[in-house]
Every structure is written in C-alpha cells, then in structure tokens.
Amino acid sequence: MEIRIEIGNKNHEKYAQAVCDMIDDAAKKRGTGIAKRKTEYIAEKLIDGKAIIALRGEEVAGFSYIESWEHGKYVANSGLIVSPNFRKMGLAKRIKENVFKLSRDKYPSAKIFGITTSLAVLKINSELGYKPVTFSELPQEEAFWKGCSTCPNFDILTRTNRKMCLCTGMLAPSKIEVEMKLNLTKLIINNK
C-alpha cells in the first residue's frame, strides 16, 4: 500500500492523538530535543491546513506542521516525526519538502526556520537551502520560546538566556527573496 502525503484538513483531525503519541514515544526514546504538543494543538494545525500528514491507509506514517511568528515575518517548520515502521524510506525528506513548500505558498515573504537536534533533519534542511544561525536570528516572541518548555533541554536554553541549546537553529530565505535573487542572476547573465 502506498504512502500518501497530504496537506491537513478537517478530515485528518482524527489522527491528532496518533501524532501526539508518536512525538511522545520518540521523545522518550531519544531523551532529548523533542517538545511535546497537546492533541488539540495538533488537531488545530491539521484542520487549518497548516500541517502535512503522511498516511498508509488509516495508519499515520509521519507528520510536520507550520506556524507563523512576528506577524508572518518567520514561519517555523516543526514537529517532523516519522513512525518507526516507516523510517529509512526517505519519508522524512518527502514530508519536509512538502511542509517547506506549504510554508512558502502560505507565507511567501516569510523566512523559514527550524530548530533541531536531529542530524537527519539538519541534512534535509541543508539540502532545502537552510543555513545554521544563532538563536538571535530567530523569532524573539515569548510564545515561540514557550513552545520549547516541554523539551528536556529547556533548562539549557533558560540558563543561557536563549543564546544556545543542544538544538541548532536553521534559517532559509523567503520565497520572495529566492525569486529576487534568481531574477537578479538572470538580469546579470542577460546583460553580459
């Protein structure tokens, strides 16, 4: 049976608990770098079309969501999770590519960012055009950093006044910035 990757909608709300369970299980196994999310929060992301869900039949294979910060100046790609049954198949990359495209489509002027301790996610992000940045280049809204409070490393973030943690902050240019750079390159080439 094929794995479908879809933009969340109200029909996917029923999978919110399964997604939360996957996140919770992964956090327990890894012991680091995964913040828990409430079922209602995940359901809201699915209903609002701000999530990507991967399904094989009725089984949740993977998930990720987006959230905007500082009035759409930044968009986070967060909560990337793949069920252990579907790992080592390139599914995380497919989900990440889809959530990245969704972010750019919904928020074309926003810079896209993420924070992670996962080497696999760092690699995928790099392939998508993300660059490592200091935490000072990420949104500074209290609500954003409050989202880290359920991570086991939150004490590190707090002790360092949000200057560092075990996570790596990564930032990608907005869709508009990419298009402007492409247009500028074309202009330079055409004028040679």
Image (cartoon, grey):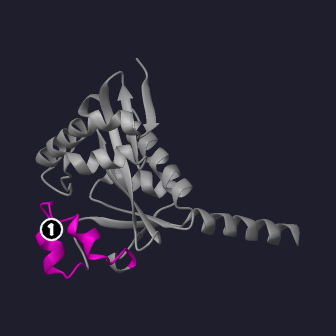
The residue pinned by badge 1 equals 154
Quarter of the rendering occupied by the C terminus: bottom right
Q: Amino acid at mark 1?
A: Phe
Q: For the point 43% across and 21% down, which residue is it?
A: 2
Name the foreground residue: 153 vs 102: 102
- Judge left or right: residue 61 versus residue 186: left
**Residue 41: x, y in percent?**
26, 51
* As drawn, 13 above or below 109: above
Number of marks in the image? 1
Q: For the point 21% across and 69% down, which residue is it?
A: 146
Name the foreground residue: 25 vs 60: 60
- Judge left or right: residue 128 versus residue 180: left
Q: For the point 36% across and 74% down, which residue is it?
A: 139
**Residue 106: x, y in percent?**
52, 56
**Residue 86 in view here:** no
Mark 1 burial class by Cα count in 10 Å: few <14, some 14-19, many 20+: many
| Magenta-highlighted residues | 137-162
Is residue 142 magenta-colored?
yes
Quarter of the rendering occupied by the N terminus: top left
- Judge left or right: residue 14 versus residue 157: right
Quadrant housing residue 109: bottom right
**Residue 163 in view here:** yes
SS class of the residue under badge 1?
A: helix
Q: Residue furthest top?
A: 1
Is residue 17 magenta-colored?
no
**Residue 57: x, y in percent?**
36, 21
**Residue 136: x, y in percent?**
35, 80
Quadrant housing residue 83: top left
